[in-house]
Amino acid sequence: MSGADSEEAAAEDGFEALARRALERYELDVVRLTLIADDWNRTFKVETAAEDTFALRVSLPLPRSDDEIRIELAWLEDLAAASGVRVPRPVRSKEGSLFVEAEDVGVPEPVG
């Protein structure tokens, strides 16, 4: 394995650890976590002991404020509840938040 390959593998392990750290903030008994998309964001399939399936998006810091993210997720929540349009339904954290922030030593902070 080349140095670049081993760095990439370490980053992937770091993103899974980061995802697991974030999931600790939710009332979910996670039994399986699978990376399903790796682009700007990492998207994981989350399977629970209750046989529910969720998607977890691990986003890198963006030039968007927390308020902009909250507004987007609240809009999805409202659409899912009232419109009859099928959209992903956000899951609130144990604290009631629409999203959480997490850190892991295996995922470097952005530079610049």
Image: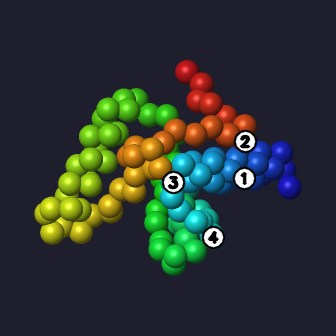
Which of pointers 4 and 1 indicates the residue nearer the eye? 4
Q: Residue furthest top?
A: 112
Look at the numbered discs 4 and 2 and tell me whether their residues touch, using CB distance below 8 Å: no
Q: Is residue 8 above or below residue 56?
A: above
Disc 3 designates what residue?
26
Amino acid at dot 4: Val
Which numbered disc flags the more N-terminal residue, 3 or 1? Answer: 1
List x then y, in percent, for residue 55: 46, 62
Look at the numbered discs 3 and 1 and tell me whether their residues touch, using CB distance below 8 Å: no
Disc 4 designates what residue?
31
Q: Which mark is residue 87?
A: none
Which numbered disc flags the more N-terminal residue, 3 or 2? Answer: 3
User: Secondary structure beneath disc 1?
Assistant: helix
Which of pointers 3 and 1 indicates the residue nearer the eye? 3
Which numbered disc flags the more N-terminal residue, 2 or 1? Answer: 1
Look at the numbered discs 2 and 1 and tell me whether their residues touch, using CB distance below 8 Å: yes
Label 4 neighbour load within 10 Å: few <14, some 14-19, many 20+: few
Instruction: Please say whether residue 42 is visible from this viewpoint.
Output: no
Which residue is located at x 34 percent, y 39 percent?
69
Which of pointers 3 and 4 indicates the residue nearer the eye? 3
Q: Quadrant of residue 97?
A: top left
Looking at the figure, which quarter contains the C terminus?
A: top right
